[in-house]
Amino acid sequence: MAAEPPVLPGADEARRWAAEELAKPEYRDAAPSWLDTLWRNFLDWLQSLDGSPGVAAPVPSPVIALVVVAIIAAAVILARPRLNARARLASDVFERETALTAEDYRHRADAAAAAGRWGDAVVDRFRAVVRSAENRTILGPQPGRTADEAAQALSVPFINEAGHLARAAATFDGIRYGNRAADSTDYQEMVALDAALDAVKPASAASRVPLP
């Protein structure tokens, strides 16, 4: 009897491959509900290949391997567009469904800080910084602008605050889209940045010399 090619797994190995790949959080978050059902059914089928009573005949390992590859490929193809869309949305400074003023964001931030929700407070205070710059026409409104893009754009007229702006953007992203915890110090730094930018004219405006 010819030996099976070593690259083709047995039932247990195929089950492990599929479980490790499709159990990743990105597939659970992005996969459509019908793919979840297909995955559960597939796991049930693989479980039945361990020689349990009632199974007429085992399925050859090459067939299992092909099915595993097909399932993983389908998951990747279906998940990628949604993952890309989520990544784009995840980087935005503002929530798409809200249109608040800088003062609105400051009030929300202060309320969150008073309740000890430092992450929410820091995020909303950074939004106040960006919205204030838009209201002052230092930045033009730009849907989808990221925290890094806002910080880089504001670093031109507020060159003295460039370092603080970069750190503020990194803090915003880490709290909003990462696992970074916030505390009162983070919030006070964001408040100080907001106050500093609000108190000075941008360099481009301050440097203008009136014509005689």
Image: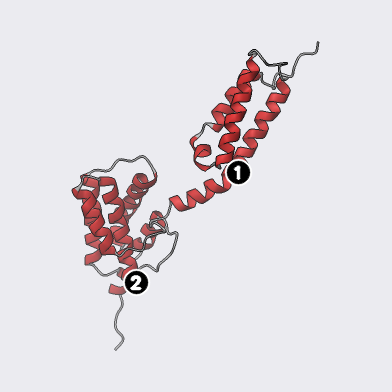
Horizontal relation, residue 138 to residue 34: left or right: left
Which residue extends farthest front? Answer: 54
Displayed quadrant of residue 78:
top right
Which residue is at 51% across, 33% downward? 24
Query: What is the CA distance from the residue labelled 1 to the residue labelled 2?
Result: 41 Å
Give residue 204's mark: none
Q: Is residue 141 above or below residue 50?
A: below
Could you tell me residue 98's position as x and y percent?
37, 60
Q: Nearer the viewer, mark 1 or mark 2?
A: 1
- Graded by Cα atoms within 10 Å as few (under 14), some (14 to 19) or many (20 or more), the crowding at tag 2 reads few
Instruction: Give the labeled residue for mark 2.
Output: 137
In front: 108, or 119? 108
Instruction: Give the labeled residue for mark 1.
Output: 78
Q: Is residue 15 above or below residue 100?
A: above
Q: Looking at numbered disc 1 in the image, what kind of residue is underneath it?
A: Leu
Which residue is at 49% across, 49% downward? 86
Horizontal relation, residue 88 to residue 117: left or right: right
Q: Is residue 191 above or below residue 139?
A: above
N-term-proximal mark, 1 vs 2: 1
Which residue extends farthest bottom? Answer: 212
